Amino acid sequence: MSTHQTRYWQDIDPGERFATDCITISKRDILEFAADFDPQPYHLDNEAATESIFGGLCASGWHVTALMMRLLTDTFVNRHIDLLGSSGVSQLRWSRPVYAGDTLSAQITVADKPTASSDPRFGYIECEVSVSNQHDKRVIDLVTSLLIGRGEGAANG
């Protein structure tokens, strides 16, 4: 039997911070994602990438954003937070390239907790997310609005 207690919207406070685990991106990961979703030369071809402004084969920003979502989701699930989804991302900035072999981790800060939604099943939290590489250099920053469950009984008052 599990001994954890699920955390709901009402249990989360602005200013709360979470550090994620790490994830390492491989050349194969970069090539496969780019081939499927962002087939630009600097994501697919070593020679073209070397001649680009990035100086080498680098991951798509959308790939890095997807990795951020994996880190965020795993972190919230591991902390038993009732994450129901996201209503969007704003202020997305890719500040430096991510290369094969880079190891990424994220810092998540609950920046705001607006009044609960009109739907009694969930509330919103606004999180600022910064992803850094193994050299502690930021590679992506964004703000996301997450839907967090309000727990049993919340829908009934």
Image (tube, rainbow, N blue to C red):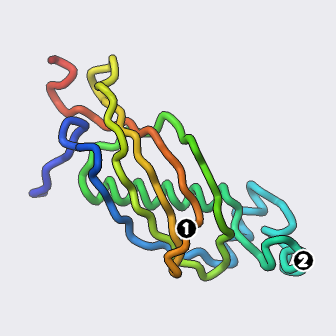
As rendered, which of 33 and 101 lies closer to the eye? 101
Quadrant assignment for the C terminus: top left
Nearer the camera: disc 1 or disc 2? 1
- In the rendered image, the vertical position of residue 26 relative to residue 4, given as above or below: below
N-terminal of the pair, mark 1 or mark 2, is: 2
| Number of marks in the rendered image | 2
As rendered, which of 32 and 41 lies closer to the eye? 41
- Give coordinates of residue 120: x percent, y percent: 27, 21
**Which residue does the numbered mark 2 point to in the structure image?**
51
Q: CA distance from mark 1 to mark 2?
A: 23 Å
Find numbered disc 1 in the image and state the secondary structure of the residue it sits on.
strand
Find numbered disc 2 in the image and state the secondary structure of the residue it sits on.
helix
Residue 122 sits in quarter: top left
As rendered, which of 113 and 11 lies closer to the eye? 113
Q: Is the residue marked by circle 1 packed among few (<14), some (14-19), or many (20+) residues within 10 Å? A: some
Instruction: Tell me, yes or no, if residue 1 can be seen here.
Output: no
Q: Amino acid at mark 2?
A: Glu
Q: Amino acid at mark 1?
A: Arg
- Give coordinates of residue 121: x percent, y percent: 28, 26
Residue at x-position 18% and y-position 25%: 154
Q: On the picture, is 114 further left or further right than 24?
A: left
Residue at x-position 38% and y-position 65%: 20
Q: On the picture, is 92 further left or further right than 51?
A: left
Quadrant assignment for the N terminus: bottom left
Name the disc covering residue 122, or none: none
Residue at x-position 75% and y-position 57%: 36
**Which residue does the numbered mark 1 point to in the structure image?**
138
Residue at x-position 48% and y-position 34%: 87
Instruction: Tell me, yes or no, if residue 87 can be seen here.
Output: yes
- Give coordinates of residue 79: x percent, y percent: 25, 57
- In the rendered image, the vertical position of residue 61 relative to residue 15, given as above or below: below
Residue 47 sits in quarter: bottom right
